[in-house]
Amino acid sequence: MFQIGFSLNYDELYQKLKQEGFSEDEMLASSLIGKSDKGNFYDKFRSRLMFPIKDVQDRVIAFGGRVLDDSKPKYINSPENIVYSKGRNLFGLNIAKKSGKDKIIMVEGYMDAISLYQRGITNVVASLGTALTEAQGRLLRKYASQVIIGYDSDGAGQAATMRGMEILQNLGCDIRILQLDGDAKDPDEYVIKYGSGRFEKCVENAISLVEFKVKNLKQSMNIQTASDKIKFLNEIVKILSKVDNSIEREIYIDRIAKEYGISKESIYAEANKRAYKEHQGIKMIQKPMKSMLKEKTKKEQKEIGNKRENVLISLLLNQEIDAYSQIKEKIAPEDFKTENNFQIAKRLYEHFEKGNSNSNVLNLFPEEELMSHITSILAEDDQISNTKKAVEDILNGYEKEKLLNERNEIVKQLENPEISKEEASNLETRLSNLIIKIAKMK
């Protein structure tokens, strides 16, 4: 499943690649082969257990190597390049997404992930030596409704957990934090020591983000003293103020009151005091809040537009010239609103207009900024099985957006009190036709 292997000594891979016809420049660019000061070529991964790192589409994009003795460094990994970005991939997601479960367990290292998989826990992924990124968070949310973070229990692991939680929370994920009983420091050690059954119970009992924050807060204070108890109460209220659902907030208040020996009335009193202070400034924040809501809507629309553009760029980069023929009928390079996408689309259009294929298309972009943008687009997992249908859907999206903008503009003109009856009648007719046309669109 994980296709784990072993790299031999010194230059076996180099000799094999040379035999297969790869040039030395290509081998060096792969980051699998190095060149010494004396001009000798050697395998960078030698005498190591090898772990292929795959993207969600099961394509090998990098490698991790681990020694079997006390040699240093213990681990080495492929560097980032056009194919591989640590912050845009997760080890084992290609396997976890097939587990049939609606939750994913995230651990720190691929040894943890493999160890759990060997014991029947298949919905597990690992980060790739970097703090959790938004791109990874979006991947997790795409394949699971609940994410359980199972990082190590040491200080570094807990700090990483907190950073990861904030990212996932901002993306709207249902987050749970694994709490291991016993004396194991990480999921790998725990499952070996206590078995998968007991580990699964820990997964089922994983605590929420609010509970995790309160637990960490409690560990940093001595609530037996009056001053710390007041601080503890104030911080709890801050945490609970971020819980939007009133029923969920009520459950947390009840649970916290029982577990930490604080009366519910004290929590409510402090919460009301805080709410009153904020309420006093309501006149000052009403207007900005209204504009903030508008900005959010515009931001969401911009994100949708960027995503749509990125998918079109991805299709042009990955598919045959047929995709271009379909796209160019309705979308010109000037229709791409982000500067990078406009520049990329312009060169691709020119490239395909000359009858070229997309085999050497990446050579069109020597600029680092454009290549970095292309890398991020190609790293997205769009999994398009029907190119023609995908393009049709995107083009329909563009058409609908134009119609909606025209509708909104007409509504705005109709609000003008100085408009004549004739102008209003004509606009209302156009508006009616637009509404019917929009309604008929899929």
Image (cartoon, helix red, strand yellow):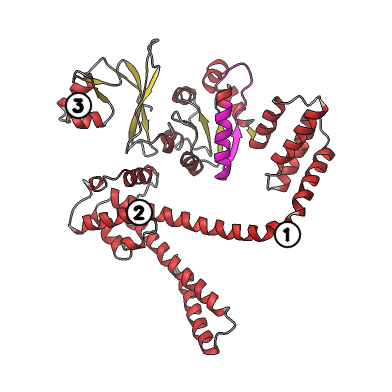
Q: Count neighbours of disc 3 (C-alpha within 10 A) and say few if under 14, some if 14 to 19, many if 20 or more.
A: some
Residue 393 rendering spot, x and y as whole percentages: 39, 60
Q: What's the distance in space between the residues labelled 3 and 1, CA to CA?
A: 70 Å
Please give the residue where the numbered disc 1 appears in the rendered image: 283
Q: Is residue 7 left or right of residue 287?
A: left
Query: Which region of the structure is painted magenta?
Result: 158-185
Residue 17 - label: 3
Residue 341 - label: 2
Q: Count neighbours of disc 1 (C-alpha within 10 A) and say few if under 14, some if 14 to 19, many if 20 or more.
A: few
Determine the residue positioned at 78% across, 44% down: 271
Q: Amino acid at mark 1?
A: Lys
Against 349, residue 82 (above or below) is: above
Quadrant housing residue 295: bottom right
Residue 285 rendering spot, x and y as whole percentages: 68, 56
Determine the residue positioned at 35% across, 43% down: 372
Which comes sooner in the sequence, label 3 or label 1? 3
Residue 130 - label: none
